[in-house]
Each structure stands twice: as structure tokens, then as C-alpha cells.
């Protein structure tokens, strides 16, 4: 007995280890068997759900009729109980089934796993049998080591040999990816009525239209919900337009201000009585809403967000307007206003509000209100600059009286700005004839107070009571009696205003004779041409208007000259605003206006036409006989100076070209040395270093001739009593240094000295101009019609303003001369030629390409 006890304990321990390893194996086998039995029962349910999801995500339920949609939905609903009934057939495996599965998978004979859990029926009957049984179990246990649970055997391929289940799975993945696109559907489409579903996916177009006066282009928005850019900056009072094509017809646009409640926006064309449900969905729906403050706008369909945009509104700043100079007048009394208007998008209108400085009498009955004076506006988009408006208000009865003027500018947002108020005497036309002055004075009295009609009649009778002594011209007498008769017969205010207008014509006829009619035709021709340019008339219309203007201009100048010959005092009448005018200046100006108008340069043509009007306003024929000889000599010296500057500029250009060729040759030599010998001696036509040096030395003679001509001009100026000044001395010194540098073949040094000589010539010319003006009596300051002082030296021969001390100041002349145009063409041709040279350095080509970009 003692000998058998250890063997029994070992057997028990061994059996415990065997059972422990078998239990772990049984668990994995149990899971495998459960999966084999459950997967075939669950797969029909999963396939039904997958097919339903595929149809939903592909948008099938959105495009099929409701009857078919309900039928498919019914099939899926009926399939669910059948699939659930299959799940009832599932049962869990028992202990013996697991053992048999292990023995089957591992091909074990004699059930070695099963006997490990079996016992003899009666162990106490035969100890030998028990020992034999234990030995048998021990031997069987040796066979069940390193067993495998095996893979699940669902046997589904036997029922689906074509693997259609894989196609369903693939379609499910594709449908899921497709659902994120604009045509993708949703799961709830199967449960929605066809009338409310999106039969065709909606096309959403959204854009913001800024106000027209801003000059900004429309801003197109993206309707996709996953856009990264959702914040947009727009001008104030912009309009958001959302257009939806197709879709369900139940889309909704909601506007949410930053500090407010959400508001639903109705469609612009919603609710037409003639629309049926089908046509209503097919017709595009437009939502239009103004954006006046920061906020968001969202687009949704039955609570499903489609798009959302956030807007940051830039407010429209009010304009500003100010006087840049005090109001002034031209020689003929035309008012000139200089001002500056600022606005972020440009002002829409500007006027000068005028009121009398002294209030009218209580019993007065004025016939005229304050004159209208619209102001010219700067071009939209330009930087703020000084703008000038000229207006002839000499015919208005308020001319000659003290007025208060305020500039008022208004932008397109109806925001208004006012300038400071200027008080001054309203310019009037000067009359030299005493009779014309008397008529104008009575005209003003009648216009300011219609009740003064009896006094004006009495004054006209007094003027015409003794015509033999007071009125030398019979036509003037008849005109005054005609005025008296018309005034006596006038009863209403309109008739009195006609008499006032007639009195102005009579006064001008007495003062100017036929010149008044010519001036009126000239102004009418100028106004007609201005309107034609503004309206973008055809070339034939422009030619017609220009022909009328030329004819009126020639007639006016002819009669003006005849009047000046008959009135010697006219030429000697001092006027600081009057400048000498030549016929060729006018013809050149008219030609440029016509060319610009035909080319479509409307703004430049209008500006040049305005300069022409200013020039005619400042016109006075200067005929001072005692200064004609000296003026001619001074003009010759000015022409000589201009010729010297032109020759010096050409010589500097030649020197610069030779120096550039030298630099280009050095760069090409460096490139050839790196490439090695390629059989080419160099570019054909390229000057060698010796040729360039020889050409530079050849320019020394011409530079010396320029210096000698300058010295001769300085001597001539001294003979006229004009000190050449420091500028000409510096120019003479720089020319000598430039000649020396040319003799040494130093092109770079020569160009610098020649440039210095040009600058010195300009300074000397400015000083010479001032001395000439002093010599001719044009330098002083003389009071104008309003008691204001103006510098006569700052006007060119066309009456245009010049910068102080600038001799050749063409910065404000926007019209290029013919020589400038030809020079510009030559420069462009040379740039294109250099670009076409394959051997030009890349750095030079990049620079030339930037020159050709006119942004």
C-alpha cells in the first residue's frame, strides 16, 4: 500500500496538468464553433442592412418614385423577421461536442480527449482494471499534447460559390465614400416622402455684389460645407444672392447678426400662384438679402446644414472736402475754385453752396436764387489731389456782391461733408464803357428786387434823355430804348427775368460789340465738345464738334485782335493773370484734344479742354511796343538755352550707350572664357574695347563745342543786363570735366559730369527766367479783381500754373509732344531688340522685361 501511494499522487498531478491545458484549448475551440454556427445565421441580416445602406448612400431612394421606394422599404422590413428567425436556430455547443471537434480537427483515434474526463463505473471491483485504465488514459494523454483548435468552417462558400457577399461589401465601402459628395444620399431618405426629397441634388450658387460705387468686383462664394475659407470681408450695404436650382424646394436661408436674433429670409420669387409643386421645384429660387453689419448667413434643408458664410463688413467712411486755395478769378471774371475731395470710394457729387453775406431787405422781391455751382470730381481710385473748377458766374446778378461759399461733397452712401466757409466778393466781369456799367448796375438792382422796377425805368429815361451828348452810337441808344419798352410792358416775374437777360446782352454789346457773340459761340462750342467727350461720341461726332470749336476760336481771336487794335489802352492795361498767347499754341492744343478724344482717353481730353478754357479766360493780347525788341532778344537766348540742353542730353545718351557696350563686352568675354574655345570670335557688330575708347575720344570735340557755346551765351546775357548766375558757371565747369573724361576714354565719369552739367543748366535757366521777368516788368505782385495777389511768374504761355522756380516744369502737362512720342517708340523698339539678343545677360533681360510691364 505504501508503495502505490506516490504513484497515485503523480497520476493526479499529471491529470490536473492535462485538464488545465485541455480547458484552454476547449475555450478557443468553443469560440470557433460558436462563430461557425452564428456567422451563417447573422450574415443574411448583415447583408440586408448593407444593401439598404448602399441604396441610401448612393441616393437611390431620392430619385425613385415613392411607390417603388415604399416597396423596397417593405422588402427590407419583411426581411428583418426572417433574419431574426434564423437567429433562433442558434444553440451553444456542449462539452462532448467540443471534445469531438478537437479530436476531429487533430485526427485523434480512440477518443483520447474524451476518455480524460471519463471514469470506470466501479473502481473498487478490480484494482488491476483501474490500473490498466489509468495507464490507458496516461498513454492517451501523451497524444493530446500540442493540439490545435482549428479554423472556423462556416461553409458559406458552399452556399455562395460566386462570392456575391464580397460585391455587397465592396459596394458598401464605395457608397460610404460617395455619400460625402454633393450627389450622395442619407439613410433617412428611405423614410421621406418623394415630394419632400431631393429628386435632383441642388446646385447652389452664392455671390456677394458690392455697391456699384465701390468699383469692386462681385465676390463668389463656395456652397460646399467643408470649405476652409468661411470668413469674407465685404463693403457695407453689399447684397448677398443665393440661387438654388433643383433640390427639394424646402431650402431655407437664415441671417444671424453678430448681436441679434436669427431671421429667416424668404425667397425673392416665392409663392407665385401659377406654380405647381413640380414647376416650383424646377424653377430656380433666389434669396437676396443686404449685408449691413457683421454676422453669418447659413443655408439649410429641413435642419440639415448645406453651407454657412461669415461676413465682416467694412463701413463706408464719410467724405471730406476742403479749400486748397482761396477762390480767385480769371481775367474775364471767371471764378476759379481749387479744392481737395477725399473719400474711400470716391464722392458721387459735390457742389458749392452760395449765399449772400448780407441778408436782403424784408420788402425785396428777388428774381434769382443763389447760382448753382457743381464741382468737378476727381477720378475714382486716384490718390487725393487738388482739383480745379472754373465757372463763369459774371452773368448772375449776385456778381460783384459779397457772398459766403461752402463746399459740400456727398458720397454714394448719402454721407455729406462740408468745408469751411469762405467770404469773398463774387467775381464780376469788368466793364470799361461807362454806358455798359450803368446798364449792368440797373440790371443788378432790378434782379435783386423786382419792386424796384419804377426806379429802373426812371434811370433808363435819365440815361436816354440827352443821347446826342451821352450816347455816341445810335445802335446803343436804340438798344436802351428797347430795354425800356420791354421793362415797361413786363408784368410777371418770368417777363422781368427775360428783361434782365436782355439787359445783359445789351451791356455786353455796348462793351464788346461783335465780340460778345463770338465769345458766346466759343463757349457753346466748348460745352458741346465737352459733352461729346463725356458721352463717348463717335469719331465723326468728335470731328464735327472740333470743327465748330476751331471756327468759333478763330472768329473769337480775330475779333479780339480787331478790338485790341481799336483800343490802344487795352494792351497797356495791367493784369497779372493775362499772358501772351500764340496761334500755334492753340492749334497744337486743339490737335491734341482731338487725338485724345478719338483714342478714347476721355479723362485726359477733358483735362486738356479745361486747360484750354482757363487759357481763354486769361487771354489778353500783349502789344507793348517799347519792349518787343528786348523780348525778342531774350526769347532768342531762351531758345539757345533749350538747344544747349538738348545737345547736352544727346551727347550724354551717346556716352551712356558706348559705356553700356563696354560693360556688355566685358560680360560676354567672361562667359566665353568659361565656355572655352567654340570657334566664335564674338558677336557680329560688337565694338571692341579700342573702338569704344576711340568713339569716346571722338565725343570730346562735341563736348568742347557745347562749352564754348555756353560761354558765348553767358556773354550775350551780360550784354542784355542779365547776370548768368552760379548755375551756368557750374555747368561750364562740369562740361570741362566731362570733356577731360572723354579724352581719357572714361565713359562712366563723363556721364556723371554731363548729368551734373544738365542739372546746372536747369538751375541757371530758372535764375535767367526770373531776371527776364523782372526786366520785362512781370515779376511783381499785383492785386486781382478780389484784392488777392498772384505770382505772374508761375504761369506758362498757355496760362497754366507752374511750380515755384521751375523753369521747364511740364509735370502737369499730361499730353506728350510729338518728339516725346517718337522717343518713346524708339526706346520700346530698342528694348525689344535687346530682349531678342540671345547673348544678352539674363539679369539684363529680366530688367528689360520689367520695363515692358505697364501695370
Image (spheres, grey):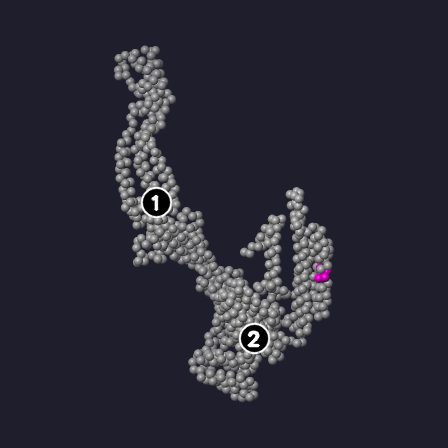
Residue 596: image x %, image y %? 54, 64
Q: For residue 832, which quarter of the picture?
A: bottom right
* Label 2 secondary element: helix
Question: Is 705 inside the magenta-drawn segment?
Answer: yes
Residue 89: image x %, image y %? 27, 31
Q: Residue at x 54, y 83 (%)?
A: 435
* Position above or below: 661 against 520: above
Question: Is 580 inside the magenta-drawn segment?
Answer: no
Name the residue carrying label 2: 555
Q: Residues within 10 Å of mark 1 (few under 14, many from 20)?
A: many
Name the residue carrying label 1: 59
* Label 1 secondary element: loop
Q: Which mark is residue 195?
A: none
Q: Residue at x 65, y 45 (%)?
A: 671
Q: Nearest to the eye among marks 1 and 2: give it.
A: 2
Q: Residues within 10 Å of mark 2 (few under 14, many from 20)?
A: some
Give whichever of 650, 428 is nearer the camera: 650
* Position above or below: 182 against 313: above
- Please provide the residue range marked out in magenta: 703-707
Amino acid at each position: 500500500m505504501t508503495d502505490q501511494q506516490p504513484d497515485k499522487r503523480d497520476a493526479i498531478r499529471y491529470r490536473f496538468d492535462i485538464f488545465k491545458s485541455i480547458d484552454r484549448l476547449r475555450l478557443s475551440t468553443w469560440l470557433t464553433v460558436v462563430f461557425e454556427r452564428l456567422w451563417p445565421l447573422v450574415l443574411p441580416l448583415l447583408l440586408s442592412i448593407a444593401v439598404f445602406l448602399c441604396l441610401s448612400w448612393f441616393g437611390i431612394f431620392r430619385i425613385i418614385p415613392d411607390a417603388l421606394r415604399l416597396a423596397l422599404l417593405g422588402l427590407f422590413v419583411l426581411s428583418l423577421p426572417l433574419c431574426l428567425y434564423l437567429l433562433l436556430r442558434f444553440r451553444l455547443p456542449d462539452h462532448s461536442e467540443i471534445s469531438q471537434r478537437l479530436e476531429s480537427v487533430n485526427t485523434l483515434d480512440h477518443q483520447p480527449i474524451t476518455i480524460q474526463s471519463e471514469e470506470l463505473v466501479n473502481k473498487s471491483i478490480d484494482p488491476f482494471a483501474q490500473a490498466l485504465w489509468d495507464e490507458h488514459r496516461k498513454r492517451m494523454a501523451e497524444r493530446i499534447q500540442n493540439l490545435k483548435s482549428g479554423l472556423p468552417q462556416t461553409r458559406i462558400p458552399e452556399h455562395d460559390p460566386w462570392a456575391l457577399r464580397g460585391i455587397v461589401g465592396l459596394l458598401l465601402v464605395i457608397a460610404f465614400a460617395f455619400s460625402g459628395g454633393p450627389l450622395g444620399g442619407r439613410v433617412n431618405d428611405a423614410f421621406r416622402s418623394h415630394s419632400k426629397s431631393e429628386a435632383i441634388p441642388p446646385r447652389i450658387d452664392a455671390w456677394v455684389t458690392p455697391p456699384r460705387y465701390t468699383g469692386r468686383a462681385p465676390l463668389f462664394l463656395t456652397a460646399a460645407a467643408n470649405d476652409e475659407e468661411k470668413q469674407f470681408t465685404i463693403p457695407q450695404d453689399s447684397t448677398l444672392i443665393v440661387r438654388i436650382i433643383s433640390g427639394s424646394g424646402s431650402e431655407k436661408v437664415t441671417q444671424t447678426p453678430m448681436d441679434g436674433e436669427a431671421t429667416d429670409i424668404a425667397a425673392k420669387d416665392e409663392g407665385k400662384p401659377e406654380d405647381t409643386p413640380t414647376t416650383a421645384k424646377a424653377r430656380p429660387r433666389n434669396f437676396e438679402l443686404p449685408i449691413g453689419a457683421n454676422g453669418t448667413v447659413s443655408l439649410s434643408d429641413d435642419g440639415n446644414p448645406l453651407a454657412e458664410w461669415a461676413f465682416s463688413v467694412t463701413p463706408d467712411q464719410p467724405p471730406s472736402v476742403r479749400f486748397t486755395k482761396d477762390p480767385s478769378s480769371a481775367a474775364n471774371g471767371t471764378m476759379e475754385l481749387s479744392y481737395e475731395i477725399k473719400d474711400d470710394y470716391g464722392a458721387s457729387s459735390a457742389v458749392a453752396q452760395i449765399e449772400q453775406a448780407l441778408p436782403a431787405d424784408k420788402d425785396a422781391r428777388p428774381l434769382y436764387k443763389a447760382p448753382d455751382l457743381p464741382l468737378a470730381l476727381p477720378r475714382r481710385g486716384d490718390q487725393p489731389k487738388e482739383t480745379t473748377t472754373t465757372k463763369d458766374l459774371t452773368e448772375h446778378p449776385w456778381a460783384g456782391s459779397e457772398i459766403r461759399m461752402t463746399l459740400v461733397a456727398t458720397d454714394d452712401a448719402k454721407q455729406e461733408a462740408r468745408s469751411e466757409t469762405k467770404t469773398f466778393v463774387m467775381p464780376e466781369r469788368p466793364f470799361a464803357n461807362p454806358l455798359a456799367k450803368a446798364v449792368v448796375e440797373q440790371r443788378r438792382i432790378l434782379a435783386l428786387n423786382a419792386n424796384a422796377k419804377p426806379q429802373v425805368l426812371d434811370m433808363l429815361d435819365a440815361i436816354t434823355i440827352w443821347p446826342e451828348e451821352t450816347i455816341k452810337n445810335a445802335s446803343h441808344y436804340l438798344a436802351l430804348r428797347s430795354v425800356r419798352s420791354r421793362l415797361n410792358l413786363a408784368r410777371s416775374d418770368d417777363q422781368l427775368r427775360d428783361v434782365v437777360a436782355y439787359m445783359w446782352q445789351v451791356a455786353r454789346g455796348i462793351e464788346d460789340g461783335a465780340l460778345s457773340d463770338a465769345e458766346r459761340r466759343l463757349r457753346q462750342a466748348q460745352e458741346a465738345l465737352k459733352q461729346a467727350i463725356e458721352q463717348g461720341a463717335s469719331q465723326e461726332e468728335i470731328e464735327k464738334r472740333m470743327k465748330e470749336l476751331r471756327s468759333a476760336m478763330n472768329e473769337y481771336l480775330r475779333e479780339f485782335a480787331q478790338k485790341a487794335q481799336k483800343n490802344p489802352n487795352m494792351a497797356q492795361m495791367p493784369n497779372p493773370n493775362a499772358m501772351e498767347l500764340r496761334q500755334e499754341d492753340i492749334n497744337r492744343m486743339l490737335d491734341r484734344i482731338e487725338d485724345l478724344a478719338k483714342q478714347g482717353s476721355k479723362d485726359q481730353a477733358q483735362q486738356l479742354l479745361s486747360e484750354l478754357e482757363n487759357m481763354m479766360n486769361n487771354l489778353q493780347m500783349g502789344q507793348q511796343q517799347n519792349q518787343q525788341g528786348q523780348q525778342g532778344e531774350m526769347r532768342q537766348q531762351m531758345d539757345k538755352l533749350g538747344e544747349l540742353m538738348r545737345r547736352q542730353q544727346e551727347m550724354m545718351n551717346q556716352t551712356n550707350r558706348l559705356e553700356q557696350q563696354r560693360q556688355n563686352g566685358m560680360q560676354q568675354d567672361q562667359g566665353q572664357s568659361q565656355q572655352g574655345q567654340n570657334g566664335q570670335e564674338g558677336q557680329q557688330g560688337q565694338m571692341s574695347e579700342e573702338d569704344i575708347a576711340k568713339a569716346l575720344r571722338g565725343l570730346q570735340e562735341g563736348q568742347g563745342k557745347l562749352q564754348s557755346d555756353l560761354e558765348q551765351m553767358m556773354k550775350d546775357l551780360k550784354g542784355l543786363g542779365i547776370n548768368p548766375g552760379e548755375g551756368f558757371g557750374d555747368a561750364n565747369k562740369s562740361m570741362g570735366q566731362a570733356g577731360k573724361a572723354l579724352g581719357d576714354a572714361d565713359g562712366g565719369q563723363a556721364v556723371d559730369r554731363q548729368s551734373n552739367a544738365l542739372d546746372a543748366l536747369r538751375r541757371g535757366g530758372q535764375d535767367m527766367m526770373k531776371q527776364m521777368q523782372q526786366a520785362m516788368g512781370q515779376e511783381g505782385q499785383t492785386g486781382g479783381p478780389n484784392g488777392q495777389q498772384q505770382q505772374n511768374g508761375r504761369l506758362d504761355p498757355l496760362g497754366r500754373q507752374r511750380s515755384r522756380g521751375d523753369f521747364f516744369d511740364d509735370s502737369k502737362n499730361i499730353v506728350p509732344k510729338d518728339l516725346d512720342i517718337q522717343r518713346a517708340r524708339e526706346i520700346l523698339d530698342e528694348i525689344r531688340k535687346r530682349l531678342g539678343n540671345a547673348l544678352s545677360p539674363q539679369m539684363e533681360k529680366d530688367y528689360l522685361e520689367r520695363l515692358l510691364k505697364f501695370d
